[in-house]
Amino acid sequence: MLEDRTTRGPWPTAYPPGYAVVDVETTGLARDDRIVSAAVYQLDARGEVEDHWYTLVNPERDPGPVWIHGLTSDVLEGAPLFAEIAAELSARLEGRVLVAHNAVFDWSMLAREYARAERQAPVRQRLCTIALSKELALPLPNHKLESLAAHFGVVQRQAHHALDDARVLAEAFRPSLRAAARDGVRLPLLECRPLTEWSDAPVRPAIGRQSSYGQGSWRPSRKRPPCPYPNPGRYEVDKPLRQGMRVAFSGDTSVERELLEDRATEAGLHVASSVSRLTSLLVTNDPDSGTSKTAKARQFGTPVIDEAAFGQLLRDVAPADPA
């Protein structure tokens, strides 16, 4: 442990040496959507700002929800392509933990853009500030960035502008990091696995239709770390999900399965590969299909919800019961 006067106590030597707080604005949420702007705040080991950077990115397609990010086709027409800013972005990510609010989304968008450019992002770990706020048991009404910012007295100047969102998150992450160091909290770091191939063939499946794992998609087989929370039992309708619940997925999804599973893991849920009597919930867009998982769910009386409902529930997962 190293002494750190800002926390009035020892600083964990096992903590990362630096962070890259990232925010991206995109044309949408699907696997074929593109980045339209990106910002990075580089922080040192204790969360102090070292530098910041921002760029527009030409998505080579319709900019999507202009009413959210404010970036029109005219604004983006002369912007650089992602392949043209990839080297500069890499220099700002190199050797740092990627920090973002709902980090699996920002990482997934970046990984796809790098794969399209036939490169790999130099990122090995990510930290989600939603997961960190839960580890710290911050008294937040919800897990929106604006709530985290308000808790630490950080003023948002321009919501959904990548540079301002990254600034707000960096300023809220600093006291979160110091609180974690002070209380000896393990940082919720997750591995980042880069894409190794990509196809530009558009894939925008409807719920319950074509799977997102078609030609050109990539999904690694991997063993997830064990869920640190005990299973609180089955999901009950009109109640929130609770950390430790066992969640299984069946059938096609509009958001790629890897992303859904990562979001569930970061929320503190146990992603199960099969359905048993211990399964808390089955997520499927086709509950009448004859898959083994849906059949077992009917047999065991396991609650079943669709992908859209699950996405809503993921926004506010209740903490695990105290041991």
Image (cartoon, rainbow, N blue to C red):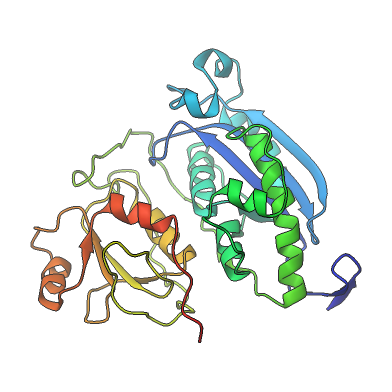
Q: Look at the image and tell me whether residue 94 can be seen.
A: no
| Quarter of the image where one finds residue 40 | top right
**How many marks can you see?**
0
Picture coordinates of residue 267, whole percent (x, y): 47, 64
Q: Look at the image and tell me whether residue 298 can be seen.
A: yes
| Left or right: 283 in relation to 114 | left
Residue 6, compared with residue 172, is above or below; it is: below
Residue 276, compared with residue 106, is above or below; it is: below
Please name the residue shown 73% across and 44% down the image. Answer: 41
Please name the residue shown 64% across and 40% down the image. Answer: 165
| Left or right: 218 in relation to 284 | right
- Give whichever of 25, 315 is nearer the camera: 315
Q: Residue furthest bottom?
A: 323
| Quarter of the image where one finds residue 185 | bottom right
- Give whichever of 313, 214 is nearer the camera: 313
Q: Residue furthest top?
A: 74
| Left or right: 172 in relation to 26 | right
Please name the residue shown 77% across and 63% down the image. Answer: 17
| Left or right: 45 in relation to 136 | right
Please name the residue shown 62% across and 29% down the image. Answer: 84
